[in-house]
Amino acid sequence: MIVVLTGGTGGAKLVEGLAQILPARELTVVVNTGDDLEWWGLHVSPDVDSVTYALAGLLSTDRGWGGEGDTFDCLGVLRRVGRPAWFCSGARDLATHLIRTELLKAGKSLAEATEEIVRKFGVVATILPMTNERVETRIETPDGELGFQEYFVRERWQPEVRGVRFVGAQEAKPAPGVLEAIRDAEAIIIAPSNPVTSIGPILAVPGIREALRNSETAIAAISPIVGGAPVSGPAGALMSAQGLPVSVAGIAQSYGDFLNTLIVDSRDAAAAVDLHSLGIEVHCTNTIMKSAADKVELARTCLRVFAGARSAQSA
Ligand code: GDP
């Protein structure tokens, strides 16, 4: 079994590639829920939904989130009547939020609700939210603290970031199956996701980072920093706010206590030279996933890296 730790857009693309080359039952995806929000009374799990839609073949390739061909009429009406409509959720997406909220209200845990939704979408791979408890990523700005989606979507990640915290993480437990998946994995991949607000919340749930540190399985990460800058989104500002360099070295520092291999883009080869001194293997390749072929190729590279690590171990 291959286990992937991921956020939304970057990781969903990689997971889509892995699903093309692995039997579905061999894939377990542990997903960030620090981005979750309550929206018009509905429980929205943006990263879980992105991974689900990706595996169901429904993810919008243009946007990288939400369903392909979804419509936004509901938001249009809300806007026209002057009601909050800043969080972008398409009509089909709303159906997912309605179903999840109904399941949670009926007493199901987030993991149980996720499993039910995932199966309804015909996805066979396992998708696990990192925790059943509420963990909330909060962004500290000069004008006060914002919820992650307020910062990211409503404010279009423009405010200066002074700090990041994961409210509730200390009291949270890994969702059932998460620690077992890490323990039983043949290989673990940290997806090309924002290290602070996508992978950070997962690692903040007590027990998960320790399980990775104690794992004897090969662990590889794919850098979301390409050519010295994020491919998209606020990873740069968030990494700087955490005192991390915005580079492949910053990614290596984020995961250095458990990482074996960092897969970096070929254009970061020079910047990655020093990482060997941290005891991290570096593998250079194209890591930009634009086409379906790019996603599959990067997924194949991950499996080749693990096969190489296994044969080096047994030699
Ligand atoms: P979110 O949950 O949607 O905010 O997004 P993620 O954290 O999963 O993904 C955003 C991160 O993925 C950003 O830091 C991007 O730099 C990175 N990313 C997005 N697409 C790609 C890609 O094709 N290749 C690589 N290497 N990184 C990517």
Image: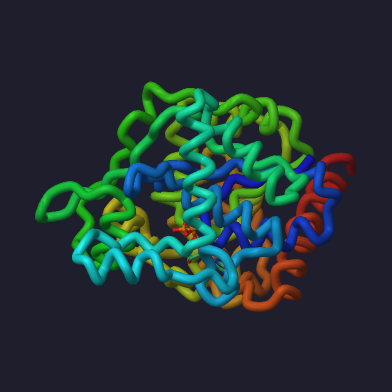
Decide: is 205 above or below 119: above
Task: Name the spot of residue 225 as percent of width and height, x first.
Answer: 48, 66
Quarter of the rendering containing residue 291:
bottom right
| Nearer to us in this view, 237 or 117 | 117
Q: Quadrant of the C terminus?
A: top right
- At x 43%, y 47%, the residue is 44
| Nearer to us in this view, 109 or 199 | 109
Quarter of the rendering containing residue 67:
bottom right
Residue 124 placement, left or right of 261: right
Task: Name the spot of residue 306 as percent of width and height, x first.
Answer: 78, 50
Colour scheme of the rendered structure: rainbow
Decide: is 168 above or below 33: above
Residue 269 appears in the figure: no
Residue 54 placement, left or right of 277: right
Residue 307 appears in the figure: yes
Task: Name the spot of residue 309 as percent of width and height, x first.
Answer: 79, 48
- At x 62%, y 30%, the residue is 178
Quarter of the rendering containing residue 266:
bottom right
Q: Quadrant of the N terminus?
A: top right
Q: How many marks?
A: 0
Decide: is 196 above or below 248: above
| Nearer to us in this view, 32 or 271 | 32
Residue 207 placement, left or right of 260: left
- At x 63%, y 52%, the residue is 52
Task: Name the spot of residue 92 as percent of width and height, x first.
Answer: 54, 60
Task: Spot the residue most to the left.
Answer: 143
